[in-house]
Amino acid sequence: VKDLDTVDNGVRQHVMARLEVPEKWDLLIGHFLGVDHAGHTFGVDSAAMRRKVSENDADVRAVVAAMSSDAGFDKTMLIVMGDHGMTLHGDHGGGSADETDSFLFAYHPRAAALRRGGASANETSSTSRTAKPLTGAFERMPQIDFAPTVSLLLGVPIPFGNLGTVRRRFWEIAHAREVLNRGAGDGWLDERYLAATQVTAAQVWRYLTRYAAKAGNPFAALDWSFLEDLYGTASDASIDGTNSDLSDFEKAQLFSRFLFTAANLARAQWVQFGTGKMILGLVLLTLTIGVQGFVL
């Protein structure tokens, strides 16, 4: 596709128009295609790609400026992301890091103030976990974590087949306004993050047990027993009225451990390629084409 601008110009026009009336929408999505088209057609290291990336940088700055200057965006979070990477030749669909890795940028009008510890006496009560300074390091986020994180932030059900978890840093940015306005620190945030990890873990456990009941347990007996123990321990520690000495932060860590373990076990079981079967398939395909050519 050589037309790099028609779709982007339309998206840009509609997004900026909707930003003028934040009270009229709950979720706004803009899908810019120019960068993808530029990579496919001209390659990553091309003048066309540099132009489109520069335009999208300006788009992000324009949205950030609108959100920062209007109190109507006090509860709004900006997410900028790509759905895949690309090789230098503009290809994707393979398994290389250049193709499978992408980026996610999350922004909230209050997040920068929260990271600085707040701008007023009320806002400086944030403790170390949420007010820590920027270190320049990026967090890695598996793509399966995006669905449960955004689902809970939007107040919609987590997809039934989800195996991801809720990212703590994402949660902090999304709730920056509440933490600042309440003068709340980690305790307020920990309580809500615990609830998020708890409901996510319940959904993952429900999915795994349903899958095991319908299609047979795909995990080894020891792995399944380990998952049961992790989920049981986390659930027991979070039951109201128990004599657990654990903080909400520590309870959330128990659920996170279960979620990370479940995802790793599922990935090892399901995300794998049978080389022998792939070779057999190619041989059969070649034979089929040969036979058809001979018959014709």
Image (tube, rainbow, N blue to C red):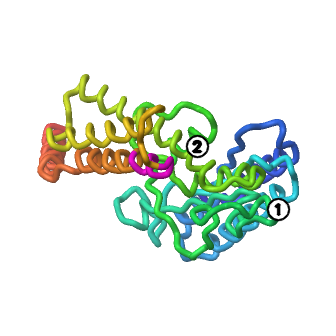
In the image, is residue 187 above or below residue 99? above
Q: Quadrant of residue 115?
A: bottom right
Residue 228 located left or right of residue 253: left
Q: Which residue position is annotated with label 1?
A: 65
Q: Nearer the viewer, mark 2 or mark 1?
A: 2
The quarter of the rendered structure image containing the C terminus is: top left
The x, y position of residue 232, in whole percent, is 32, 36
The magenta stretch spans residue 248? yes
In the image, is residue 105 above or below residue 134? above
Question: Of helix, strand and loop, which one carries label 1?
Answer: helix
**Mark 1: amino acid:** Ala
Disc 1 crowd, CA 10 A, few/some/many (<14, 14-19, 20+): few
The x, y position of residue 159, in whole percent, is 47, 33
Residue sitting farthest toward the top:
214
Q: Which residue position is annotated with label 2?
A: 192
Report the front residue among 2 and 268.
268
Image: magenta residue range: 247-254
**Mark 2: amino acid:** Arg
